């Protein structure tokens, strides 16, 4: 973050998890900010908007339009939804999953920002060190759906696997870490080879053994069958 950005006050709206991460980041980078939440009055918001260089709407998707409408028209307004399309605020989606634990500034700096193309020319965005990628508004739903599959869906599967590892097999979840790290590395390097698994080998005995073993885990068995069906339709990677 350059010195120009440090001289500009940021108005943050909302006091949830994302807001907490934003406040922590700006504090570590010595960038002045002020906070407004919906427990405060509109008059307080109007006062806090004076002199702000940008308003960051860290609010739920359903509140974006209402809150943006309370701000001065000329103020740069940014929302962080991956799917919402607004005529009142620009979309800047941080491609990251945020836990309750705060991060180091250099980690925040590396988070990719997927943005409305129109905002790429804005000085405020150019001042951020993050990699920036434009995305057409009509592609936001597909983008967000893919993020949901890559993040929440994969985490749900892994949590279920870890639960069975620890509960039934009495194996610590940490055993999976090298395997999972290597699997992700293969995907990132475009070296994925699903032919190595029983689906690719058409190993029906192993597949049936898997299904019998998963009888006590109906959700995972259903998922296994869905994956098999999708693999059959989509073919190997």
Image (cartoon, helix red, strand yellow):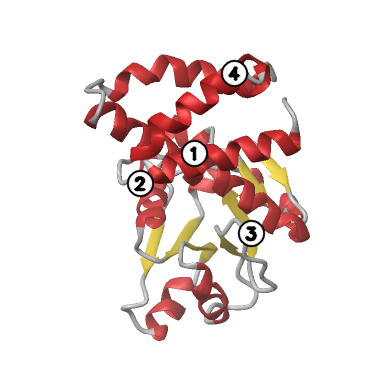
* Mark found first going from the N terminus, 1 or 2: 2
Asked which secondary structure carries label 4, the reply is: loop
Residue 148 lies, in percent from the top left, at 55, 49
Pick the residue in front: 90 or 52: 90
- Residue 205 in sight in this render: yes
Q: CA distance from mark 3 to mark 2?
A: 21 Å
Residue, disc 2: 24
Label 1 or label 2, whichever lies nearer to me, is: 1
Residue 197: numbered disc: 4
Identity of the residue drawn at 43% across and 40% down: 220
Residue 188 lies, in percent from the top left, at 63, 23
Residue, disc 1: 154
Residue, disc 3: 91
Residue 7 lies, in percent from the top left, at 50, 50
The answer to which quarter of the image holds residue 196 is top right
- Residue 104 in sight in this render: no
Label 3 or label 2, whichever lies nearer to me, is: 3
């Amino acid at each position: 973050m350059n010195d120009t950005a440090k001289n500009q006050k940021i108005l943050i709206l909302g006091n949830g998890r994302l807001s907490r991460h934003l406040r922590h980041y700006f504090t570590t980078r010595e960038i002045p900010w002020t906070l407004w939440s919906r427990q405060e009055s509109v008059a307080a918001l109007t006062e806090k908007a004076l002199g702000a260089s940008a308003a960051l709407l860290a609010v739920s998707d359903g509140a974006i339009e209402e809150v943006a409408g309370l701000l001065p028209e000329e103020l740069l307004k940014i929302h962080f939804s991956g799917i919402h399309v607004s005529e009142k605020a620009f979309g800047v989606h941080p491609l990251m999953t945020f836990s309750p634990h705060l991060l180091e500034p250099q980690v925040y700096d590396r988070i990719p920002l997927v943005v409305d193309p129109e905002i790429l020319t804005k000085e405020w965005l150019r001042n951020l060190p993050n990699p920036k990628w434009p995305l057409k508004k009509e592609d936001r739903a597909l983008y967000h759906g893919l993020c949901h599959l890559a993040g929440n869906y994969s985490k749900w599967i892994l949590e279920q696997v870890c639960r069975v590892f620890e509960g039934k097999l009495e194996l610590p979840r940490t055993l999976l870490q090298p395997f999972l790290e290597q699997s992700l590395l293969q995907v990132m390097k475009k070296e994925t080879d699903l032919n190595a698994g029983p689906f690719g080998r058409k190993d029906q005995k192993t597949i049936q053994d898997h299904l019998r073993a998963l009888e006590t885990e109906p959700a995972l068995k259903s998922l296994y069958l869905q994956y098999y069906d999708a693999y059959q339709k989509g073919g190997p990677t």
